[in-house]
Image (tube, grey):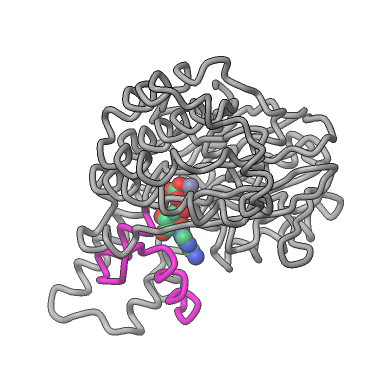
Amino acid sequence: MASERRKTILAIETSCDESAIAIADFSDGNVRVHSHIVSSQANLHALYGGVVPNLARREHERNLVPILVETLKGMPQHVSVSKIRNTKYLPDRQAGQIQNIDRILAREPELLHHFKKHILALPPPDIDAIAITTGPGLAPALWVGVNFARALADLWRKPIISVNHMAGHLFSAFLEKREKEMLAIPKPTFPVLALLVSGGHTELVLVKKPWRFHMIGATLDDAVGEAYDKIGRIMGLPYPGGPAMSRLAEEGNPAIYPLPSPMLHSKDYNFSFSGLKTAAFYLIRDLTAKKKLTKKQKADIAASFEKAAIDVLIKKTLRAAHEYRAKSILLGGGVSANRSLRSRLGDEIKKHLPDTKYHIPDTCLAGDNALMIATAAYMTGMKKARNPDEVRADANLILGTD
Ligand code: KG4
Ligand code: ZN
């Protein structure tokens, strides 16, 4: 665990189609959020029916500097003229340093341009470290964030902390809202079992002690969010399909078109959603052979799909919690915004494991954001990379092996 001394972390997240930056202070289980900005590219990728990696990369290149400038406005000292006058950064910024930034951002010319125009002139913010998502995610998107973090670390002489995106989702479940900008992190009780469900991953992660992650199960094919999105797309729902499907599912009857829960009875903790996706695909194909789906039919299909997916997620999570005697269960990742999953898992824990704590993220922190990356950096002990050049993006990073 990190020392209880106050740490201020600036975190950057660009693993997929959200450009996000946050600055927060952490001390003694309390979190004060100075800034927390998420800029979603969803509307752009919606035109293509899914995330286009090079488009995501281009948008991150455009978005990061304006977001950072906005984020820094949340820092109290940023506007203090006296502190600006007193800082020693000006003489440091010699030609050599600018050359470094030219080199670090050589592959992101648009970002380099914005960086030189808007960031070089700023005083270094009063932060202890820069946290950056290094993976897993889309390589072109990750690299923009990583190189941006490296350039900032070089300019401001700050350490970089590499963060696994899935660790970010895991820790987001611990952030409890207090007042407006204050959050609290309760002392976790171990073992912790985390069900992480997103657009790219479906994982069961066991944490016996802080913070050693053991992945005890994962999807063998599609992630659950991905399956939601694909079925949503086939039914003509807006992108991303997950939220739209879950809204529809609330009005539907899952008994009308029963769909299979893949691997419900398998002895391991792995998942598979491609069979469910295919079954839903054939059902929709048969129903639409003669005429278009009615709203009622769409709702019934969504409800059936959701029931089949959530049944298997809950069953395996509870079985793992029993086997490993989990004292805390947590839910994280974009799909953790799903109301049915949140409430059904909570009800089952209350019923079968009443002494187990249940942590879920606030719905506004369920999707990708940078506050969760700052939290993971703090909670895992502020591990630093010695040299910013050592920090690399890894699209296939696996929790527990990094
Ligand atoms: O964690 P996240 O924001 O990005 C990734 O790391 O992938 O997760 C995004 C996924 C998408 O597949 C989206 O459709 C899904 O989370 N999602 C939902 C809901 N809200 C977002 N899936 C089901 N029900 C929801 N309410
Ligand atoms: Zn995510």
The magenta-colored residue range is 225-254
The image shows residue 147 at horizontal and vertical percentages of 40, 31
Is residue 200 shown left or right of residue 356? Answer: left
- Tell me the chief SS of the magenta region: helix
Q: Quadrant location of residue 170? A: top right
Name the residue nearer the viewer: 320 or 186. 186
The residue positioned 27% from the left and 66% from the top of the image is: 283
The residue positioned 41% from the left and 26% from the top of the image is: 394
The image shows residue 319 at horizontal and vertical percentages of 67, 43
Residue 248 colored in magenta in the image: yes
Quadrant occupied by the N terminus:
top right
* 365 shown above or below 135: below
Name the residue nearer the viewer: 289 or 202. 202
The image shows residue 378 at horizontal and vertical percentages of 70, 36
Quadrant occupied by the C terminus:
top right
The answer to whether any part of residue 255 appears in the image is no
The residue positioned 74% from the left and 34% from the top of the image is: 324
The image shows residue 384 at horizontal and vertical percentages of 62, 22
Is residue 298 shown left or right of residue 303? Answer: left
The residue positioned 85% from the left and 42% from the top of the image is: 28
Is residue 256 shown left or right of residue 283? Answer: right
